[in-house]
Image (cartoon, rainbow, N blue to C red):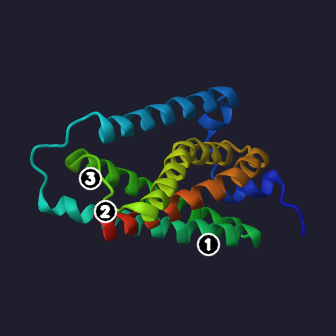
Amino acid sequence: MASTSSNDLRSIIPVVPTLESLSLWKGITAIMAVSVAAFAFLLWILYVKPASAEAGSWVYMLPTLNASLNSIATVMILAGYAAIRRRNFKQHMTFMIAAFVASSLFLVSYLVYHNSVGHTVFQGEGFVRVAYLTLLISHIILSATVVPFVLTSYYMVFSGRFSLHRKVSKWTFPVWLYVSVTGVVIYFFLRAYS
């Protein structure tokens, strides 16, 4: 397999000059600050802030939308992985941007739902409850890491740091995929037992 030079990739991938000139550590620090703030905000909405007084009936359709967006993200992540394995950089970029958009829309919809409804309590008991909580805990822990992983992967590629993008993405891919898939599984657990 022939290697692709940075100049070849620069002709395919738009490198953002502002990101390219930003020091690596400043970029990573900004990503970590945004990620921690986003996760803290999510925890506040889920566990501290009271639910909104009036939630419209449309809000209760959002979990299905969320599962659909996670499913789309999963398919796009897998398609992006397949494209990069074939060294089709344009297709890879298209699929990964689509995965990012689907995941971002999911996050907005998720926040709207939980801002309106509050925390969802799982009603299952026994082994099902243990299985659900085990899955949920792993999902929560990895979802806290997926935002900085994804943002760092994007930062690396759009700042022209292609070799670092490749290294970070080897971690980003399985975490992002796991979080997207388990999000859908959690939806079905909640739907069956709530």
Q: Is residue 108 above or below residue 191?
A: above
Disc 2 and disc 3 in contact, CB within 8 angstroms: yes
- At 24% from the left edge and 65% from the top edge, which residue is drawn? 61
Crowding at label 3, few (<14), some or many (≥20) Cα neighbours within 10 Å? many
Q: Secondary structure at mark 1?
A: helix
Instruction: Find disc 2 in the rendering and name its residue.
Output: 63
Q: Residue at x 57, y 43 (%)?
A: 145
What label sits on residue 122 in the rendered view?
A: none
SS of the residue under disc 2: helix
Give residue 54's position: percent from left, percent from top: 9, 48
Q: Secondary structure at mark 3?
A: helix
Give the CA distance from mark 3 to mark 1: 29 Å
Q: Which residue is mark 3?
A: 113
Amino acid type indicated by mark 3: Tyr
- Compare residues 45 and 68 and report the one nearer the observer: 45
194 in relation to 5, above or below: below
Circle 2: residue type? Pro
Between the C-alphas of marks 2 and 1, the distance is: 24 Å
In terms of sequence position, does the residue under pointer 3 or pointer 1 come before the other? Answer: 1
Number of labelled discs? Answer: 3
Measuring 52% from the left and 65% from the top, which residue is drawn there? 181
Q: Amino acid at mark 1?
A: Ala
Counting residues from the start of the chain, the first of labels 2 and 3 encountered is: 2
Q: Residue at x 33, y 71 (%)?
A: 192
Which residue was labeled with disc 1?
79
Name the mark nearer the viewer: 3 or 1: 3
Binning the other alpha carbons within 10 Å of mark 2 as few (below 14), some (14 to 19) or many (20 upward) gives many
Residue sitting nearer the eye, 96 or 18 = 96
Q: Quadrant of the C terminus?
A: bottom left
